[in-house]
Amino acid sequence: MLPKNSKHFIQPTAEELECDATLINDVVNFFYAQVKKDLNELVHHNVHINELGTFSVVKKRIKPLMDRHKKHLDVLTKESFDQVAIRKKMERKYQNFIKLKELIQEETERRQQFYKNKNESN
């Protein structure tokens, strides 16, 4: 399967819908920007995109990434202007990992409870 670039379907879609190609281009760019933001900021452990599939976080990779971000935060002790911006970015990413880990834990508990209730009813 060869992935298609968005430029390959903007013009045909604009002609089919009888709209301006720039409008279709703006919609496509907005959609992909939102998807990229959701994936980068770890909004949820599963991101479902219609017609593309579900993108899931690999659970075993969270701990090493958290450790790496924590180590980077420990190294950033000097309070220069450049390091303050880097530190804020790293802290935000670290907090996103913590939230993601909590989401995964809640989902795991929810599934265990569901299966427990299901087995008890049978």
Image: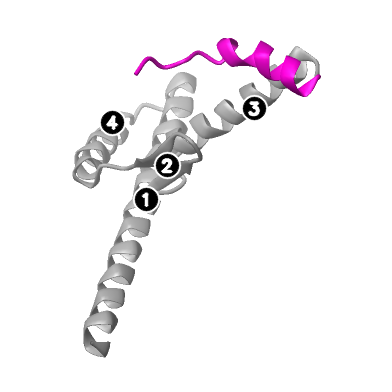
In the rendered structure, find residue 16 and report the number of the disc placed on it: none
Q: Earlier in the sequence, mark 2 or mark 4?
A: 2
Which amino acid, by three-letter code, is at mark 2? Leu
- Tags 2 and 1 touching, CB below 8 Å: yes
Q: Earlier in the sequence, mark 2 or mark 3?
A: 3
Mark whose residue sits in front, 4 or 1: 1
In the image, 11 versus 90, the foreground residue is 11
Q: Which residue is mark 1?
A: 100
- What is the spatial separation of the Cα atoms under label 4 and label 1, in whole angstroms? 19 Å
Name the residue at 28% across, 83% down.
Answer: 117
Residue bounds of the magenta highlight: 1-18
Q: Which residue is mark 3?
A: 30
Say whether residue 55 is left or right of residue 108.
Answer: right
Q: Coloring scheme of the render?
A: one colour
Please tell me whether the stretch drawn in magenta is mainly helix, strand or loop: helix
Residue 94 counted in the magenta span? no
Mark whose residue sits in front, 3 or 4: 3
Q: Earlier in the sequence, mark 3 or mark 4?
A: 3
Mark whose residue sits in front, 2 or 3: 3
- Tags 4 and 1 touching, CB below 8 Å: no
Q: Which residue is mark 4?
A: 72
Q: Residues within 10 Å of mark 3 (few under 14, many from 20)?
A: few
In the rendered structure, find residue 42 and report the number of the disc placed on it: 2
Name the residue at 23% across, 88% down.
Answer: 120
Which amino acid, by three-letter code, is at mark 4? His
Q: Residue 33 in the image: state x and y as whole percent.
A: 57, 27
- What is the spatial separation of the Cα atoms under label 3 and label 4, in whole angstroms? 32 Å
For mark 3, give the secondary structure: helix
Instruction: Farthest residue to the front: give it.
Output: 16
- What is the spatial separation of the Cα atoms under label 1 and label 3, in whole angstroms? 24 Å
- Tags 3 and 4 touching, CB below 8 Å: no
